[in-house]
Amino acid sequence: MQTALKTITAVSAITLLLSSFSFMPAHAQETAKSTLEEGKELAFDRLKGNCLACHHIDDGVSPGNIGPPLLSMQARFPDKAKLRAQVYDATSNNPNSMMPPFGKHGVLTAAEIDKIVDYIYSL
Amino acid sequence: MKKKFALALGLSVLISVPALTSASPEEDREALINHFKKAFPQVPFEDYVNGVYALDADARQQWQAIEEFAPYEIDVEEGQKLFETPFANGKSYADCFANGGIGIRQNYPYFDTQSGQVKTLELEINECREKNSEKSLPWKKGDIAKISAYMAYTARDKVFDIKIPDDPRALAAYEKGKQFFYAKRGQLNFSCADCHIYSAGKNLRTDLLSPALGQATHFPVYRSTWGELGTMHRRYEGCNEQVRAKPFKAQGEEYRNLEYFHTYMNNGLPVNGPASRK
């Protein structure tokens, strides 16, 4: 009886979850899209990421060519955490890196880095 | 893949940088020249005095058109007037400098064994004024830059010959300048070398980065961005500020030592100051 009840609660919890999920796709796509756009803006903004100073990215105008072009990021970084680590502190991988340690030196906040990484990962 | 890339980059950096210790100034200079010979085999040594225009043919054409009606010409004339106008006591700048101040730019900055410090041309212009009971001029632009421009102009085509006298303090000043050039600084964590050695010839967004070799031959410089002349230390400030580092004082010890190293690297190249730049 006890276990049956537990099962029922568990099942209904799952249904509840599932039913709330059924609202998700449209909603998630919306937030995902705006996060990507925010990430793109932060990446291009000269006073924020200014990634275009060194990287060719997407449709960004007059990019620099000091770093490699940022494309096919999912193939190059199967582990997204490694991509984030590169943006957070490029010098941990290469102490001589020309790339500013955006997180470590507080150039960008953690939330800003997350958005930029989400955007870069979509390329 | 990523690791390999970073490693390759690290190695190339190790190989292409003059070692930070134990190399003599002359070895440093040769290593720098060789680095750029490899990076830009098509650029003749003498052409490095032209900065980015040695590397970018399109920009060079526009720049040459500008140089024909040089925007600094009037500054050189005014500089000459200022230079030749006697102080209230009847003496003049000519009395303070070797050869009356004419054709001597190629020897600046130099290490003064008497005071134990690096003397730049601008420093001595103001020392000359103070010695003659005149007020010193602001360091970065205006009259001091005009006088310096005139003095450079009279030395055009003379070859830079910065010496490190046999005095441990001179070598120490050189080494401090060199450390400054290779040290990462500022929130953005760049060294001068990051931009002007490792990334010279590349684009930082829309800016083509000039090679360190030849950077000191043509100062003071007329920058269209400034719309006027500025001294080397004004440029150092700008390059420090763009990496969000606190700039040092113009004519303070740090920048004078930096200029000593930076100009020593230009030995063998001719004076072509003043010049115009973007």
Image: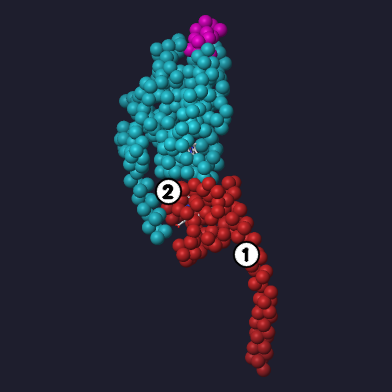
Chain colours: A red, B cyan
Q: Is residue B43 above or below residue A58?
A: above
Residue A49 placement (x, y as % from top left): 56, 50
Residue that numbered label 2 is attached to: A96
Give the tally of numbered discs.
2
What residue is shown at x 40% (from left), y 30% (from top)?
Answer: B49
Residue B89 falls inside the magenta stretch? yes
Quadrant including the N terminus of chain A: bottom right
Magenta-colored span: B82-93
What residue is shown at x 53% (from left), y 60% (from top)?
Answer: A123
> Between A30 and B28, which is closer to the camera in this rendering?
A30
Residue A7 placement (x, y as % from top left): 64, 88
Visible in this render: residue A65? Answer: yes
Residue B240 falls inside the magenta stretch? no
Visible in this render: residue B32? Answer: no
What residue is shown at x 36% (from left), y 42% (from top)?
Answer: B39
Q: Name the quadrant containing residue A117.
A: bottom right
Q: Residues within 10 Å of mark 1 (few under 14, many from 20)?
A: some
Q: Main secondary structure of the magenta part?
A: loop
> In this rendering, would B271 be left or right of A1?
left
Q: Amino acid at mark 2?
A: Asn
Residue that numbered label 1 is attached to: A32
CA gap, disc 1 and disc 2? 34 Å
- The chain containing the residue under callout 2 comes to A
What residue is shown at x 68% (from left), y 79% (from top)?
Answer: A19
Residue A73 placement (x, y as % from top left): 49, 61
Q: Secondary structure at mark 1?
A: helix
